[in-house]
Amino acid sequence: MKKYFQFEELGTNFRTEFTAGLTTFLAMAYILFVNPDILSKADMDQGAVFTATAIAAAVGTLFMGLIAKYPIALAPGMGLNAFFAFSVVIGMDIRWETALAGVLASGLIFIVLTLSGLREKIINAIPAQLKKAVGAGIGLFIAFVGLQSAGIVVGDEATLIAIGDLASPGVLLAIFGLVVSVVLLTLGIKAGIFYGMVITAVVGLIFGLSEFNGIVGSVPSVAPTFGQAFAHFGDIFTLDMLVVILTFLFVDFFDTAGTLVAVASQAGLVKNNKLPRAGKALFADSAATVVGASVGTSTTTSYVESTAGVGVGGRSGFTAVVTAGFFLLALFFSPLLSVVISEVTAPALIIVGVMMASALKDIDWNEFEIAVPAFLTVLMMPLTYSIATGIAIGFIFYPITMLLKGRTKEIHPIMYGLFFVFLAYFIFLS
């Protein structure tokens, strides 16, 4: 084992790698409860999604550890699950089974693109600042979903949205959870989101806002969601689903690429500005999405929370193997789903939104031709309640403003192609 994971070359050992794997798991364990809560809004069985989430995370992380040998963990992605539930199923009125088939299709396309080497070329075709805008926009969207599910922000006939009833027990619980999470993360506690959820869930129990059904129990059946992606694969051949699949592809493209570079750089694994075994890492991510869609969850992607494990010394793929083991163990803790209500998960959504919005600093707001498509991408995601719409509007405006500015040489041909795809999408909708 030491030889396979190159412990000596990387200056690590079994104890350090185990501690790192546990730290990474604790930093991202919130997804086990947040993901079922979000996808249940799309009428998916919460217990089945819990099991699918743990399986997808365990298998994807194991692939990353054994094949690519990176200390990086995977799980169903935040933002992509919100897009799945709120934009695709609720917003576009597409059945969740068909949406799962779209996730499966994107995973299969990913595998082909990865094996052919085209994935890196497509990533490079999208302007860096638009990539940042997409990440920041998804952050605002996720935070908005969190505020809404907590009841902090509610609908209003006169102003569209307004502040909720701050005296409501549920809203007070969510605000308490947000404050606790902020305090823990500000103090530098890596697993602050997870610990914040635990403390908030306990307080919710004390005040009777949720019910306790035990800690350990049988693994929920995955039957309600298993195989639905294959059964409804024939339903994806529509213009609506083309845009959905493109969005799944696009967001996961940059989410994974950015996370791989960030975590590998922190671990000192980048050599000569290149990522060793990048193809294997991208393949692990693609295969994880296919596995996740097969069992019943939205797109699986690499998690930046992996930096928590790297921060305590994780350097090899064994860190990921340990994390995968804890995700499998977590399958037996499904009774906690009755305790982790929406008001408990809402703070996690808001905090993740804050973290993703940090990408705004990397956009050059002084260049108007860049600022316009970037701003519209970020703004229109929460305002239209659709990640896909935000991306589409931004990608339509980008070639227009760049052409008018005379910067035609900077526009990649792929961007022209996306311009016409998204334009056709809006024409079709109207």
Image (spheres, rainbow, N blue to C red):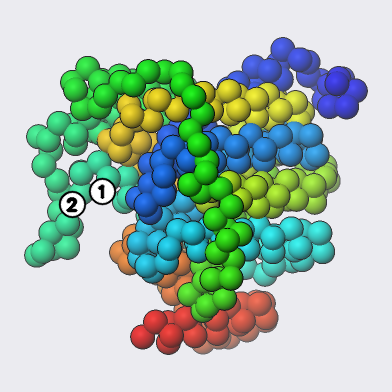
What residue did someone put label 1 on?
148
Rendered location of residue 14, percent (x, y): 76, 15
Dot 2 or dot 1: first in sequence order is 1
User: Of the residues shown, which amino acid type is indicated by label 2?
Assistant: Val
Determine which of the numbered discs, if any, sits on residue 389 in the image. none
- Residue at 70 percent across and 49 percent down: it is 287
- Residue at 66 percent across and 77 percent down: it is 414
SS state under label 1: helix
CA separation in Å, label 2 and label 1: 6 Å
- Residue at 49 percent across and 85 percent down: it is 424
- Residue at 71 percent across and 34 percent down: it is 62
Rendered position, 160 above or below 415: above
* Res 362 visible: no
* Res 397 visible: yes
User: Of the residues shown, which amino acid type is indicated by label 1?
Assistant: Gln
Q: Is residue 174 left or right of residue 238?
A: left
| The furthest residue to the right | 3
Rendered image quadrant of residue 11: top right
Rendered position, 153 above or below 102: above
What residue did someone put label 2 on?
154
Rendered location of residue 87, percent (x, y): 40, 62
Nearest the viewer among 346 and 403 is 346
Rendered image quadrant of residue 378: bottom left
SS state under label 2: strand
Rendered location of residue 25, percent (x, y): 57, 27
